[in-house]
Image (spheres, grey):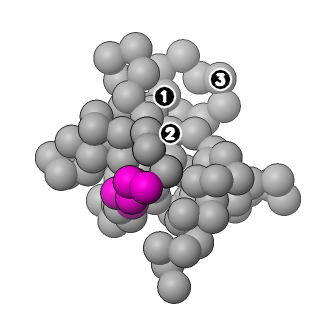
Amino acid sequence: MNTQEKMEVLESKTAVKHGYGTAKYRWVSGLTKQERDTVRCGGLVFFRVPKRHWTQSGYKVVVYRNGRWDAREPNETELQLIKGNNK
């Protein structure tokens, strides 16, 4: 992606995470069509989660992996985009 392009960043109010850690069948449900399309096109969709450990950010980033919608911790660049989006 060109650095001149602006990545679309969306906060999902409807996403729900199921399963945690290395659970075999963890997934994210409740995504809208716009949120799914944004992830497929390379955009960033995140949602808030309760911090259960001091290393967690309190956010999860939605990814499409192995035919499922999944969530992971944001990296530093994504975390800056998320915090900039919440101002």
Check residue 71 in the rendering and tell me which mark sits there, or answer none.
Answer: 2
Disc 2 from disc 3: Cα separation: 12 Å
Characterize the local packing of mark 2: few (<14), some (14-19) or many (20 or more) Cα atoms within 10 angstroms: many
Q: Which residues are drawn in magenta?
A: 4-9
Looking at the picture, which amino acid does disc 1 mark? Arg
Which residue does the numbered mark 1 point to in the structure image? 26
Characterize the local packing of mark 3: few (<14), some (14-19) or many (20 or more) Cα atoms within 10 angstroms: few
Tell me if label 2 and label 1 are in contact, CB under 8 Å.
yes
Q: Residue at x 70, y 53 (%)?
A: 76
Is disc 2 placed on a helix, strand or loop? strand
> Which of 60/83 is in front?
83
Magenta region includes residue 69:
no
Q: Position of residue 60 (x, y in %)?
A: 54, 50
- Does residue 73 appear to the left or right of 34 in the view shown? right
- Choose mark 2 or mark 1, whichever is in front: 2
- Choose mark 2 or mark 3, whichever is in front: 2
For the N terminus, the quadrant is top left
The extreme left residue here reads 33
Which residue does the numbered mark 3 point to in the structure image? 22
Looking at the picture, which amino acid does disc 3 mark? Thr
Is disc 1 placed on a helix, strand or loop? loop
Magenta region includes residue 8:
yes
Check residue 78 in the rendering and tell me which mark sits there, or answer none.
Answer: none
Q: Residue at x 38, y 54 (%)?
A: 5
Disc 2 from disc 1: Cα separation: 9 Å
Q: Earlier in the sequence, mark 2 or mark 3?
A: 3
